[in-house]
Image (spheres, helix red, strand yellow):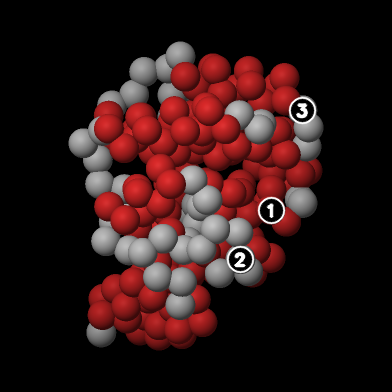
């Protein structure tokens, strides 16, 4: 059954068994080849496995097929960043920005801040982080954005800011998603005890710090 294969693939990906996760999600797609959410998860499994060129190709195929760009935008932007495809990332962000409100674009603003900080453009990165800080969100949205803010602050070398974000999330009534344990954008946070505590709240043992 596709649901069984999908659920198993998701579990395997979240626990770092990427090769087996890929086998399972492939089986699910073979059984339901027209189901777009499964194909999105193909890209997610590849992204979590650090197979960025393949993940990008999968997400771009979905966009070419008319899929909602916001369904894959976060992982696609970060895969572009981690692959060094700056021009593609900027073009994709520019195509999306006019279509939504500032609040709905906040996660992508933080992804761009992360990218700018990694390039040494710290002034622009800090301005984007502060811009997002000033926006208002429901609790669940705010908590996820604080994690993304922590990623950007780590790239800025702001370790105290990272800890403040992680402690803010820890204090919230929020169940962190299990993908914290494997998503590549969080790799540089894995050494923080505060981040490890958030991962443990998902029921998983934290992946080793890089």
The answer to whether residue 163 shows anywhere in this view is yes
Within 10 Å of disc 2 (Cα), the crowding (few <14, some 14-19, many 20+) is some
Q: Earlier in the sequence, mark 1 or mark 2?
A: 2
Is residue 18 or residue 7 the one in the foreground?
18
Residue 196 percent coordinates (x, y): 41, 51
Q: Is residue 73 above or below residue 18?
A: above
Q: Nearer the viewer, residue 49 or 76?
A: 49
- Residue 10 occupies which quadrant of the picture? bottom left
Say whether disc 3 or disc 1 marks the residue closer to the N-terminus. Answer: 1
Q: Quadrant of the N terminus?
A: bottom left
Q: CA distance from mark 3 to mark 1?
A: 16 Å
Q: Measuring from the top left, give residue 51's x and y in whole percent.
A: 63, 69
Is residue 170 found left or right of 46 in the rendered image? Answer: left
- Considering the numbered disc 2 on the image, is that residue within a helix, a strand or a loop? loop
Q: Residue at x 34, y 24 (%)?
A: 137
Residue of label 2: 50
Give how far across and how far down residue 59 sits, in percent: 56, 59
Q: Is residue 14 above or below residue 94?
A: below
Q: Position of residue 63 (x, y in %)?
A: 56, 55
Residue at image location 76% in from the left, 50% down from the top: 85
Badge 1 crowding class, 10 Å Cα cut-off, few under 14, some 14 to 19, many 20 or more, is some
Rendered residue at 27%/61% (across/down): 203
193 with respect to 160 (left or right): left
The answer to whether 153 appears left or right of 194 in the picture is: right
**Does residue 11 lie above or below 87 as drawn?**
below
């Amino acid at each position: 059954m596709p649901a069984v294969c999908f659920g198993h693939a998701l579990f395997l990906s979240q626990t770092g068994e990427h090769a087996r996760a890929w086998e399972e999600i492939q089986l699910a797609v073979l059984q339901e080849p027209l189901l777009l959410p499964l194909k999105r998860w193909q890209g997610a499994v590849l992204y979590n496995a650090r197979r960025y060129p393949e993940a990008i190709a999968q997400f771009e195929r979905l966009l070419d097929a008319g899929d909602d760009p916001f369904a894959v935008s976060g992982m696609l932007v970060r895969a572009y960043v981690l692959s060094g495809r700056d021009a593609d990332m900027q073009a994709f962000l520019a195509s999306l920005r006019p279509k939504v409100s500032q609040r709905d674009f906040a996660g992508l603003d933080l992804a761009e801040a992360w990218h700018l900080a990694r390039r040494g453009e710290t002034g622009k990165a800090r301005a984007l982080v502060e811009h997002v800080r000033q926006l208002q969100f429901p609790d669940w949205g705010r908590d996820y954005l604080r994690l993304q803010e922590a990623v950007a602050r780590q790239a800025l070398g702001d370790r105290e800011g990272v800890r403040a974000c992680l402690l803010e999330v820890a204090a919230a009534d929020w169940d962190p998603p299990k993908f914290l344990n494997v998503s590549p954008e969080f790799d540089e946070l894995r050494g923080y005890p505060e981040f490890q505590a958030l991962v443990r709240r998902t029921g998983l043992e934290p992946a080793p710090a890089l």
